[in-house]
Amino acid sequence: MKKHLHTQTEQTTDVNFNDGYLVISCPDAEEPVLWRMKIGNVNETMITVKANGKNFNINIQTENEKPKKIAIFKTKEQAISLMDKINNSLNNKKSTSCQNNSTKDNKQTAKTKKNYKSDIIMAVIGTILIFIFIWLIQSPADNNLILSQETTKTGSDIGEAISADDFLKSR
């Protein structure tokens, strides 16, 4: 007859953040649980340990929500240990969020400066083009061309003087 030996490894609670979720694994709880919660505002999170008969409940509460039971432990020390792990994880998340926000702000500032420079360049180029367009409209070569076209329309020869009365009669 063969005997099966079962080796048990000591399993302890683990807390981490994953894709904006607080993930708590409690294999050493009275009722082992893997608990996951989306955390929006870390600043408004409350963790409590409450005695419940011979056991200790650990609860978490976020802004505008009712407390949620995470796990039940036999000893107060186990519950407080989990509370400390959650607190450390939330603090790390908070500092990471601050660093990420600071990095985003720096990138946005750089983009704003870049956009500001390109806006100035585009304004200068636009102003130059407007001046060139106005200069082309008012150039003397174009005025001579317009005058010569008008004299051709009246039917008079170039260089021949005509009185105003004769000009009006010919029309």
Image (spheres, helix red, strand yellow):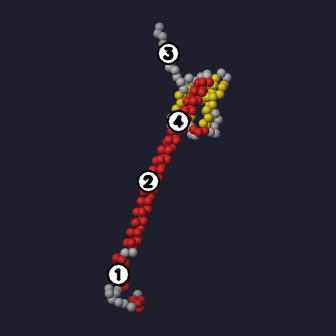
User: Which residue corresponds to the image point at 62% horizontal and 35% vertical from the top-left?
Assistant: 46
Q: CA distance from mark 4 to mark 3?
A: 37 Å
Left-right relation of 163 to 10: left
Mark 2 falls on what kind of element?
helix
Image coordinates for residue 121, horizontal then vertical, percent: 42, 59
- The CA distance from mark 1 to mark 2 is 51 Å
Q: Is residue 64 in view?
A: yes
Q: On the picture, is 165 further left or further right than 46? A: left
Crowding at dot 1, Cα within 10 Å, few <14 / some 14-19 / many 20+, comes out as few
Point out residue 171 in the picture as x, y percentages from the top left corner. Answer: 41, 87
Q: Are marks 1 and 2 in contact (CB under 8 Å)?
A: no
Which residue position is annotated with label 4?
Answer: 92
Instruction: Give the CA separation, mark 1 to mark 4.
Output: 83 Å
Mark 4 is surrounded, within 10 Å at the Cα level, by few (under 14), some (14 to 19) or many (20 or more) other residues, namely some
Indicate left or right for 149 with 18 as reference: left
Q: Earlier in the sequence, mark 3 or mark 1?
A: 3
Q: CA distance from mark 2 to mark 3?
A: 65 Å
Of pointers 4 and 3, the one earlier in the residue sequence: 3
How packed is label 3: few (under 14 Cα within 10 Å), some, or many (20 or more)? few
The amino acid marked with disc number 4 is Asn
- Mark number displayed over residue 114: 2
Give the vertical position of 120 relative to 108 (above or below).
Answer: below
Whether tag 4 and tag 2 are in contact, CB under 8 A, the answer is no
Spot the residue most to the right. Answer: 53
Instruction: In the displayed orientation, state which residue is furthest to the top.
Output: 1
Q: Are marks 4 and 3 in contact (CB under 8 Å)?
A: no
Residue 57 or 77: which is nearer the viewer?
Answer: 77
Residue, disc 1: 148
The residue identified by callout 3 is: 6
Q: Kindly report the distance in space between the C-alpha atoms of the residues bearing marks 4 and 2.
A: 33 Å
Amino acid residing under circle 2:
Lys
